[in-house]
Image (spheres, rainbow, N blue to C red):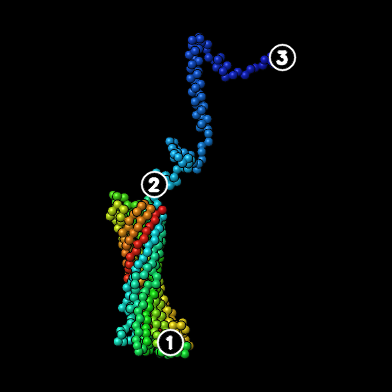
Amino acid sequence: MKGALTRGPRVKTLAARLRESCPQVPMHRRRRASTSRTSTAVVLALVALVATRAAEPVPATDQAVPPPMYVAEPFTGAAFNGMPSCIDPEGERCWPRWFAGASGLVMTRTLPSGAATMQPIAGGQLVTSDAGFGWPGGVDLHIGRWFGPRQQQAVEVIYWGLYQMGDSASLASGPPGIDAIPQAPGATVGAIPAGDFLAAAAQQRIERADAINDVEINWIYSLWERPEFLPRERPVNLMWLAGFRFFQVDDQLTLTSGSGDPAIGAIDLGVATTNNIYGGQLGAKLDWRVLPSVRLAVVPKFMIGGNAITNTSSLAGANGRQATFAGVPARAFSELGVFSWLGSVDTAIAWDVTEHWSLWLGYRVVGVGNIAQADAQWPAVVTSPASLSGITAGSETIIHGGFAGFQSRY
């Protein structure tokens, strides 16, 4: 029993089992079998190597792993930093989506016929339109972004403005003989009657200071893809736009009538009228590539909106002391709401210097109707503060001038 336990059952190896199961063959056949087993071992080793490589962990996608056949930059010694991130899944290039630009403006505007500020004299007569316009400067800024895989839709925000638009005109008389319009019987500046400033004055000056402000938020839809990059086979592109627009015309007139007596000084009559027009607008953008890098651009727009008009008229001494009627200040504030319309056209030549930069030069015309201007609020006579109140609308103006600037796409 002990010998049996000592021997015990043995666990046969896989090689022993294979020898027992395989029939005995002669020596010359054994050599061939040995060669066959060697080939089988080589194949099994290759399979094991492939399985081992497959079991190795795959590098994370965010690691900078060189692609096959990658060749490093010579002389720099820089490691592989990864493929560019601006590649879409469809294999197309990454087009700029944001655009922004700035321009300088040099513009003027038309004026109504004007109201007389004095009675005629031998030296002539001043009217409010004599305080005309030069060509003051301003600024135009815009920014926007294209959306969608084909960049056929965009949103843009625009601001442009003109400041301190206006000029002045003056007339002197010796001996003093200028009778201002208006006269203000019953008004006093301190203890001095207003008539001492307005009747038989030695000089008169009329001055204008206006401002224009425009804010737009537009949605743009292009009939074709990527309108900022026109292909050679399609040199013309059309876009529609719709959005909100705010347009302001601020018109201020100041009449200074000097008595000729330094002890008395002068008196000022100021009329400040502001139009705040807001509403929806529609428009279009047409681009025509006349040369490989030169485009003709035309942008017409039209809006009808509400106009919240305000007017402030005041009579005061040149030193700032308010004139009064029996202690009541000679000052009035008025409001009026009407509908006004606006149409504008920008025409420009654009030079696409690169895919990211463009320069342009153009001319802008803006027409505004059914507005109030300070000239129409000029009083003929001031007998009480109520004489300075009220607003007369219904006039129109055309603001026009040139612009030049650039646009960046990124």
Q: How many labels does the image show?
A: 3
297 or 178: nearer the viewer: 178
Of pointers 1 and 2, the one earlier in the residue sequence: 2
**Could you say where residue 26 lies in the image, as x and y percent from the top left?**
50, 9
Q: Which residue is tagged 2?
A: 93
Q: Is 409 drawn above or below residue 140 in the view shown?
A: above
Query: Alpha-carbon distance for marks 2 and 3?
Result: 85 Å
Q: Which residue is tagged 1?
A: 262
**Could you say where residue 229 lies in the image, as x and y percent from the top left?**
34, 52
Q: Are marks 1 and 3 in contact (CB under 8 Å)?
A: no
**Which of pointers 1 and 3 indicates the residue nearer the eye?**
1
Picture quarter containing residue 92?
A: top left
Query: Alpha-carbon distance for marks 1 and 3?
Result: 146 Å
- Residue type, mark 2 in image: Arg
The local crowd at label 2, few if under 14, some if 14 to 19, many if 20 or more residues have their Cα within 10 Å, is few
Q: Do the residues labelled 1 and 2 touch (CB within 8 Å)?
A: no
Q: Is 330 drawn above or below residue 156 in the view shown?
A: below
Q: Which residue is tagged 3?
A: 2
**Could you say where residue 174 lies in the image, as x and y percent from the top left?**
34, 88
- Residue type, mark 1 in image: Pro
Would residue 201 be found to the left or right of residue 46 on screen?
left
Q: Is 43 drawn above or below residue 365 in the view shown?
A: above
**Which of pointers 2 and 3 indicates the residue nearer the eye?**
2
Query: Alpha-carbon distance for marks 1 and 2?
Result: 76 Å
250 or 117: nearer the viewer: 117
186 or 18: nearer the viewer: 186
